[in-house]
Image: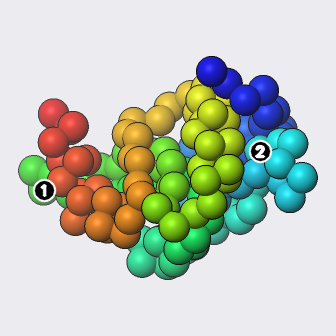
Amino acid sequence: MASGIPVSDDCVEQFRNLKHRKHKYIIFSLSPDMRSVVTLKTSSDASYKNFLAELPDNECRWAVYDFEFEKDSAKRNKICFFSWSPDTAKIKQKMVFASSRDSLRRCFDGIHMEVQGTDPTEVEYDAILAKALSSTR
């Protein structure tokens, strides 16, 4: 069941920019009044560690990250959609985020991988790399 919370046009525009390599990652959240999905931050910083630092310990976020890796001596990339819902986030926020996720995800054409994380081990570099390698032919 969808929450009916609309996605701002800026979210879609920033995703297009990421696909055209203008951004490395985008962080999304609910607006303060919890009535729409908004872009919180865009970055061209290639550091996965810095990207992970954008995922707060006690609040939910969505993110899109252009994950680069090597397989068979070739550089590859996968656009990853992250649903970050830490166990320590408030129950109401987790419920609204979960019910709004599909509305946001449907706006993005070209996602290669989806990652759901509730603790840092689920989104650490090695876990994402393993998932990317296993899903690449």
Q: Nearer the viewer, residue 88 or 6?
A: 88
Q: Nearer the viewer, residue 10 or 90?
A: 90
Q: Give the answer, above or below, for where 122 lies relative to 111.
A: below
Labelled pair 2, 1 in contact (Cβ < 8 Å): no
Under mark 2, the amino acid is Val
Quadrant housing residue 97: top right
Between label 2 and label 1, give the one nearer the viewer. 2
Quadrant the C terminus occupies: top left
For mark 2, what is the residue? 37
Few, some or many C-alpha atoms within 10 Å of disc 2 (few <14, some 14-19, many ≥20)? many
Q: Is residue 24 left or right of residue 127?
A: right
Q: Is residue 29 left or right of residue 33?
A: left
Q: Position of residue 63 (x, y in %)?
A: 56, 54
Residue occupying the point 25% across, 47% down? 132
Report how many numbered discs are placed on residues in the image. Answer: 2
What is the distance, in whole Å, between disc 2 and disc 1 at their CAs? 39 Å
Q: Position of residue 94 (x, y in %)?
A: 60, 50
Few, some or many C-alpha atoms within 10 Å of disc 1 (few <14, some 14-19, many ≥20)? few
Q: Position of residue 49 (x, y in %)?
A: 42, 78
Residue occupying the point 89% across, 52% down? 33
Quadrant the N terminus occupies: top right
Q: Nearer the viewer, residue 113 or 89?
A: 89
Quadrant housing residue 96: top right
Is residue 14 among the parts visible in the rendering? Answer: no
Mark sitting on residue 128: none
Quadrant housing residue 40: bottom right
Tag 2, which secondary structure? strand
